[in-house]
Image (cartoon, rainbow, N blue to C red):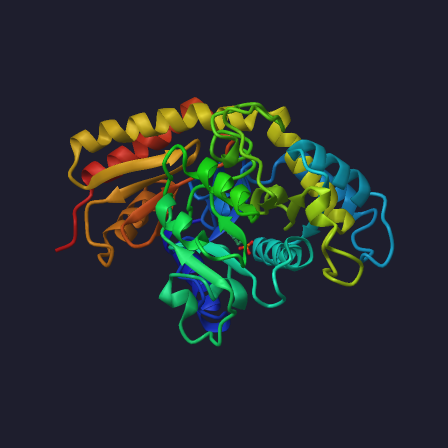
Amino acid sequence: MTTSTSKKNSQEYINLENQHGAHNYHPLPVVLSKGEGVYVWDVSGKRYYDFLSAYSAVNQGHCHPRIVETLKQQAETLTLTSRAFYNDVLGPFEKYITEYFGFDKVLPMNTGAEAVETAIKICRKWGYEKKGVEENKGQIVVFDQNFHGRTTTIISFSSDPDAKRNFGPYTHGFIKVTYNDLDALKEVFEDNKNIVGVLVEPIQGEAGVMVPGESFLKNVAKICKEHNALFMADEIQTGIGRTGSLLAVCGNCTCSGHCEQQSTYIKPDLLILGKALSGGGYPVSAVLADNPIMEVITPGTHGSTFGGNPLGAKVAMTALEVIRDEKLTQNARKLGKIFRTRMEKLIEKTELICLVRGKGLLNAIVINDHPDSSTAWDICVALSENGLLAKPTHGNIIRFAPPLVMDEEQLHECCDIIEKTILNFKQKA
Ligand SMILES: *Cc1c(COP(=O)(O)O)cnc(C)c1O
């Protein structure tokens, strides 16, 4: 295939999306048609390293053979029963995931936003039925610059004007405080008996990989406990190995399953998972909690036609097995250190990047330009030309989050691509 026809091919697909799809995204001009492990290929056959991993939904790598095999087998056997009946996969999945993460119970849903909605509903109901807050008075604390999804309730407490503007009227009952500011958090709890929970991202991914101070999460949990409010961890992006521990709330523990290392583990009252629970194959999300909390959910109070379907349940189980069997958590931790060391060396050689931050394989570099400039976007376009796909977030920040199945040699090759691209980059006037 010649370059000109392949270019035309890509443009044709882009035109189709532009003409027939809602313009709710602004993709890089790359049209992908195949994926395997850490690689994706475009329609002309050009290979790229994927440094976004579908926002951390493909931690296990593209088209992982075990996950694909599970999908195929279960798709040929039983895909959907609804929860009107039992099926022979949901129970084993529920046992597996609750033991894996150390909770009594799980409530399975499909997408991340649905799981966040589920956690909010459980938290409010718990507040009225267990904590004794007067009905409709419950409040949930959230953080500035949060990202928890796109439903009407969730965008009601977003700080992003694009996500929020003209989608009102908004859902009440949320108090926003500055991320990583414990005094601000303590202050809102003072004289407020109606707070039923705190919803937090252990690292703010969409905000630009904002890593809070060492003791922040521990103290959020402590404040919640003192005030009898639920500590809700949204680990949709940070969980399942991404940050070099099974969950970001596991701190520095590297074990590949649940443990309660008192020194670092902070057990959330409600744990919210999504993205990589899918193994990149089939959307599955979940909320985990212990009995005293989950028991507020009774027949008819919450549900989803597809939540807990046998296809998703089977895929999620395999997705978690792959994380454990291939030691992807440990690999993320090891490679993350190498990545940040390489980026720090690069920062010494260029004015274009001013900072690298992150944990495990959830990292970002900050471009030394105004957030409204197109520099980060232009760098991402140049990176794609050199065979590496990444996307800017919040203007001048580029997130780097490859699949966790990457090996050390590949990572160094990727760092070479980033280095070469940055050092050769000519800023537009
Ligand atoms: C992606 C994400 C969500 C939303 O998940 P969807 O599957 O897109 O609905 C919620 N919270 C966090 C932290 C996320 O990164």
What residue is shown at x 51% (from left), y 40% (from top)? 221
Q: Is residue 71 left or right of residue 354?
A: right
Q: Position of residue 416 (x, y in %)?
A: 30, 30
Q: Position of residue 156 (x, y in %)?
A: 47, 66
Residue sticking out furthest to the front: 191
What residue is shown at x 23% (from left), y 30% (from top)? 346
Q: Is residue 294 visible?
A: yes
Q: Is residue 208 left or right of residue 135?
A: left
Q: Is residue 173 left or right of residue 415?
A: right
What residue is shown at x 78% (from left), y 48% (from top)? 310
Q: Is residue 71 visible?
A: no
Q: Position of residue 112 (x, y in %)?
A: 57, 53
Would you identify the image quadrant in which residue 362 lies?
top left
What residue is shown at x 17% (from left), y 35% (from top)? 350
State the quadrant of the C terminus: bottom left
8 vs 243, nearest the viewer:
243
Height in image: 254 above or below 376?
above
Would you identify the image quadrant in which residue 93 lies?
top right
2 vs 243, nearest the viewer:
243
180 vs 156, nearest the viewer:
180
260 vs 187, nearest the viewer:
187
